[in-house]
Image (cartoon, rainbow, N blue to C red):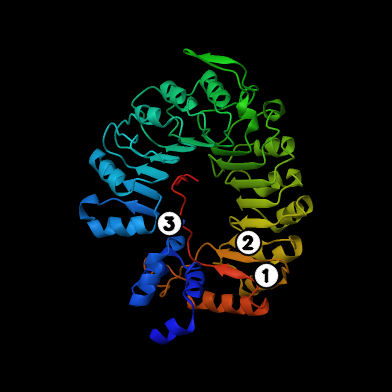
Amino acid sequence: MALIERTLPEEVWIQVFGFLTTREKHNVRTSCRYFKDVVDRHSCLWRDLSVVLSRFSSYNRQMWVTLRRRNVSSVVVRDGKKKNLKQLALSLPSLSTIAIENWSEESLELKQFSTLRRLAFYYSPCPLDISRALVPLSLQVTQLSVCNVKLRSPVVDFISTVSKMVHLTSLLYHHDGSQRIPLRAFHCLMNSLPKLKHLSWEMIAYKTLPEDFFNPTTVKMGSTECSQPAGLALSSLELLNYDTVVSHEALRRLCHLHSLSVYHLYSVPGPTCHLRTWLTVLQQLNTVSVHGGHPLVAYADCMPASVTRLTLCVDMTADDLVTLAGRVPDLRHLHLEPWGSAGLIGLIPHLFPQLRSLRMRHHNVPDRDFLSLYQLQYLETVEVLDPYYWPNRAVLDQVTYEPSPHLLDLIGQLQSLTSNRVHVITSKHQRDPLTCHCI
């Protein structure tokens, strides 16, 4: 190791290690003392690290020292208790992101985290008093996610508490359909959050969207009057479990919306494609993500021409892709997971020649179709979403979660054909703690 240490400057190793996943950095760290020292001393290598904490009794002093040295600012607290949060505040006082998952007590306190900006609550076996925990944080939290959490207080009280978090730029609220949020409360929420840009909302309780749903007027919730039309400033909208009738008039006030993600309630939808209404009205969209619902043929011909980033996890045919290609000539980023169709990847170089990035599954994709991606002269990144294989096809429950030798060979061929211009990703990115598993 001494020879390498003398030959290459430390800055070069830092640059190289920056391309590694968290697991790979840990492997490098255990290979020799020099690499351990380099990895531990440079917090820039751990800038996006989010640590899952669940067994607090097993964590020793050295672990907390290591996390502080790496400037860890994001944690997921799983199966935690109040005493664990006290320990966390003492050990990592500069946290900016905390996700509380599977909390088993009825209340919790977070006011000791003075630098907290991003907060999430996921799942709870018993009703949780979130409102009480949020009140001291109302002027500091900018991103909030609440998913499948039983509320101890009425949902209207929870919405009223969130309405006071005036610096929120992102809000996610998902539930099992049991929470009925009055339109007045929703309007007050929208009017009270002037900085809100991203909204992820549970739609299972809505059968028909009122025409004034996105047109909040001055309303009063208790002693609070809400009169700022902040809801119209939304630039990103996610709709979960969507199967809602909507009119053109209900969407016309979303003039600033540039990103729309729709997660349909049913994989086998009803007779009417409501997504078509959204796409017809919102012709300014540049990002569209569709999961489930009607086949692509139901709305391909009304996809906004301004779309440059597209995710499709739906049923489709080759003809549907041809129609789509005529609508989005400037498509740059594509995530494609066709249901029940094979042989579509081979069409991509001809239909979407401007692509810069492609996310895809490689199983059932012919080798020639995979290698045909070299024809995309602007392509920079291919992400393989299913880098696993069965060493023995006769034993299907034995899966190896790493790229197969055959996939690695295909990747090598593609990189050779593109003179290493294309970077192929086979490792999973660390999930943002504020993104729930519904998305």
Pick the front one: 228 or 61: 61
**Residue 383 versus residue 2 in the image, above or below:** above
SS under mark 3: loop
Q: Are marks 2 and 1 in contact (CB under 8 Å)?
A: yes
Residue 374 % position (x, y): 69, 72
Q: Amino acid at mark 2?
A: Leu
Give the residue at the far bottom of this rendering. Answer: 3
Label drawn at residue 358: 2
Q: Amino acid at mark 3?
A: Leu
Instruction: Give the spatial CA distance, label 3 vs label 1.
Output: 32 Å
Pick the front one: 228 or 363: 228
Pick the front one: 366 or 140: 140
Residue 368 % position (x, y): 65, 74
**Residue 32 versus residue 217 in the image, above or below:** below
**Residue 55 versus residue 209 in the image, above or below:** below
Label drawn at residue 373: 1
Q: Is residue 19 visible?
A: yes
Label drawn at residue 49: 3
- In the picture, the quarter occupied by the N terminus is bottom left
Q: Amino acid at mark 1?
A: Leu
Instruction: Give the spatial CA distance, label 2 vs label 1.
Output: 9 Å
